[in-house]
Amino acid sequence: MLEFLLALVLLWILALRCRRNRPGLADLRNWSYAHRGLHGPGVPENSMVAFRAALDGGFGVELDVHLLKDGNLAVMHDSLLNRTTGQAGRMEDLTTEDLKHYFLEGTAETIPEFAEVLALFGGRAPLIIELKSADGNHAALTEAACKLLEGYPGPFCMESFDPKCVAWLRKNRPDIIRGQLAENFFRSRNDLPDHLKFLATNLLFNFLTVPDFIAYKFADRNTTPSTVLCRKLWGAQGVSWTLRTREEYDTAVSEGWLPIFEGFLPDKPRLPEGEE
């Protein structure tokens, strides 16, 4: 019985494998990241004005990318359009031409193309790019994002809740820094079967993705020992989302997580050298 338990522990540890000290990770450290841009009243999330505000403030940015019907990429968190635009529909059913007809949160801002955001930043601050897959489009989405980023001059990384996106990067673009997004899925996802909730919550798809970092929900970071094993044993960088108070921010930074914040301004856009 003891041998069986030890074998299970060993298999668990091996399943959590991460890639250690990937070149380029240092360029992502010591930055604070504005969640969906620096948004607030009158400044919609994932909008060009929110991204300009973050860039002007000296912050990196976390943003979300969807694959459009015509193969282009646009920036939006939800697949459904009603919350942010007040209109029915899905991102995956839109074309590039359609984007200018969807206004964000009652403002004059429209849904940005991913290429517009890349042109705005131009490498001046790092980007955390979340790939939002839908309808089995993980390969087409990830490949399209990689093509747009070819020759991009600044630091960036890609992450996804979908392990298939991260696995695609591992196989096809191993040069790109990749991360696995996770949280306690038993709390957040009623649409998943329990075995998938268990595997995803405990980062047990890492044997397929071998991520450079894990991006875990701040409130759930102590849900599983897998977060500690990934960071301390396998050497993965931790990214913490979404920090909504200075206390959460300070705690995450003190624990070595890269901070993704929203709803307040950190005291310093960039962290002192040596902190992560």
Image (cartoon, helix red, strand yellow):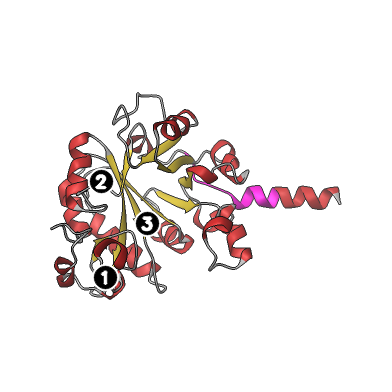
Q: Residue drawn 44% across and 41% down?
A: 240
Work out whether residue 151 or residue 97 is closer to the camera in this orientation and state it: 97
Q: Residue at 59%, 49% (x, y): give it.
A: 16
Which element carries disc 2, helix, strand or loop? loop
Q: Quadrant of the C terminus?
A: top left
Please name the amino acid that badge 1 sits on: Leu
Closer-to-camera residue (174/127): 127
Kind of residue indicated by mark 2:
Gly
Is residue 117 visible in the rendered structure shown here?
yes
* Residue, disc 2: 40
- The residue that disc 1 covers is 68
**Left or right for 122, reference 222:** left
Q: Secondary structure at mark 1?
A: loop
Return the residue nearer the eye: 76 or 163: 76
Q: Earlier in the sequence, mark 2 or mark 3?
A: 2
Real-space CA distance between mark 3 and mark 1, rounded to the nearest whole angstrom:
22 Å
Bounds of the magenta segment: 10-20
Q: Is residue 37 left or right of residue 246?
A: left
Name the front one of labels 2 and 3: 2
Residue type at tag 3: Arg
Q: Position of residue 38 (x, y in %)?
A: 25, 43
Does residue 207 appear anywhere in the picture? Answer: no
Mark 2 and mark 3 residues within 8 Å of each other at the beta carbon: no
